[in-house]
Image (spheres, coloured by chain):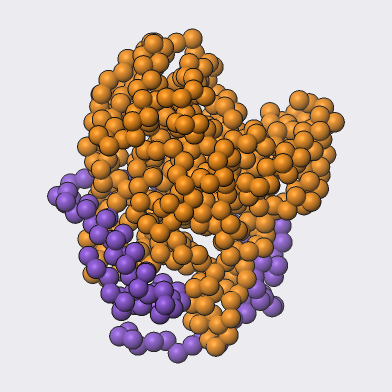
Amino acid sequence: MSDPSEALASAKAAADRIVKVKRLNACLTPISELRKSLVAQASAAHPSGVLYGMPVAVKDNICTLEFTTSCGSKILEGYRSPYEATAVAKLKAAGALIAGKTNCDEFGMGSSTEHSAYGRSLHPFDKTRVPGGSSGGSAALVAAGAVPAALGSETGGSVRQPASLCGVVGIKPTYGRVSRSGLVAFGSSLDQIGVLGRSVHDAARVLSVISGRDPKDSTCEERDSLRLPTVPESLQGFVIGVPKEYFPQDLDPAVRRASDRAIRLLRELGAAVREVSLPHTAYAVATYYIIAPAEASSNLARYDGARYGPRFNGSEDVRALYRTTRGEGFGPEVRRRVLVGTYVLSSGYYDAYYRKAQQMRALIAQDFRNVFDRGVDLLFTPTTPTPAFKAGEKLNDPVAMYLSDIFTVTANLAGLPAISMPIGRIKGLPIGGQLIGQAFLEDEMLEAAYALERAVPAGEEA
Amino acid sequence: MSVTHDEVRRIARLAELDVSDDALPLLAEQMSRILEYVAQINAVPASEAVKPFVPGPDAVRFRPDEVKPWPLAFGPAQLAPAFRDGFFLVPKLGQFEDAGA
């Protein structure tokens, strides 16, 4: 596309499609505002950009100038950021159109998009189920065909898990591949902006544009943008490890069948497949749910009713202002995590929890290094232990909700790139398979994903 | 691992978070469950030999320390609940609680 009239048509068509799927509660931007902005953006977009005219929705915890950034929270209701995320600026520079802000669990804390102050998002194929989370709005919009791609963010699997449940592709890049400038901080040592797309190619194109160095983020590596690989004829020469810890005895039989079929296809494509072990996997969720809340309790200290968003009562003194604003502004899951994070960092508990979790994180990262050092190029696992679950099913049991991240948190803890792609269906509901790559070798990971995507009958029952 | 109501109150004070008395029983129960679950990492023997894992570049890079024009699309007056003459307006600073309170 290089014609301004085509870009304008694309903008209008995207707005129409987003209206059609309004029932999903996946897009938080009011439609009249979205329509107006899309038309303005299409007129201003640069026709030479590689994403010219492509509508890309953006998770509500990524700062945009066009729309409010509420992070799915009451505490930032109506908040308009005075700057935009580097990833968003890069998208616009490439000619993409920012197609509204997508619903998410508050501050990215959740696995179902039920923890949004603006109501839950619905699964695009079954309204009684969740689309996953926390980037559930982005996944649902892409799965419903409203946009070809959307930005999400990951701290423990928040792009890959909803991608798996909604039947789309989700990429979490290596920590440091994409700038975090303008991504509202949750767990700074884990957070990364990721991409959800209809296909590996759509997601990879967007990732390539948003990747690369950024002087505004000191944790972003000094590297050029990701270069996209070509679709390989075969996977001859690839060694793919299958970690046995990701296939426990109680794994949903259909998830196992779909994964086994994908592994067979990887072999047929020419890859050498071997079983490997990541022995500390069993402790990953526990490790994550110490480190992430600890970092969150610190990062979210800035929301106090003085500097951002609305202020809730508390006129008595400044401490009362902080406490009432935070008490009323945060939802139950954020409150819980801030409290757990404060607890594990508090005097007397720090060594037993936080320090120990840091040691575990190092062991988990070492597990991956050991496997990759022995000649394995990539790992294949299921993305989630089950397909999309019912809304409300895990809402009152935080530990059960946390366990839906069991196959995704390890890549975040180790800072590795990973991609989830559809590998089959269970009673009509999609399930995803995951490839985990070596740090900054997204190109290898994408090569294998391209090949698997072409081979796997993703729409068929497993 | 069982978290008491008093512990929840103490942690909530540290976190500057209002927690109503009605919310205490459920919060205490859920925090206890979460802390009991995450405590399983203590089953693995501590190893001081493992080098801490820090993702991202090995060395923190610094930008030149130079004064540049305000890079924002608009100033804090438009994003803060109350802002005047370059200051965020808040109620008076309260009496800080005693350490044991």
* Residue A137 or residue A6, whichever sits in front: A137
- The quadrant of the rendering that contains the C terminus of chain A is top left
Q: Could you tell me which residue is drawn at 75 percent across and 28 percent down?
A: A48
The percent coordinates of residue A403 (x first, y second) are: 35, 47
- The quadrant of the rendering that contains the N terminus of chain A is top right
Chain coloured orange:
A
Left or right, B36 with reference to A129: left
Do we see residue A135 in this rendering? no
Residue extending farthest to the right is A5
* Residue A391 or residue A409, whichever sits in front: A391
Q: Could you tell me which residue is drawn at 57 percent across and 27 percent down?
A: A199
For residue B13, above or below residue B98: above
For residue A456, above or below residue B62: above
Quadrant of the image occupied by residue A261: top left
Quadrant of the image occupied by residue A91: top right
Do we see residue A9 in this rendering? yes
The percent coordinates of residue A338 (x first, y second) are: 41, 65
The percent coordinates of residue A438 (x first, y second) are: 38, 30
The colour one sees for chain B in the rendered image is purple
Quadrant of the image occupied by residue B17: bottom left
Q: Could you tell me which residue is drawn at 45 percent across and 10 percent down?
A: A234
The percent coordinates of residue A445 (x first, y second) are: 44, 25
Left or right, A162 with reference to A54: left
For residue B77, above or below residue A370: below
The number of numbered badges drawn on the structure is 0
Q: Could you tell me which residue is drawn at 54 percent across and 32 percent down?
A: A168
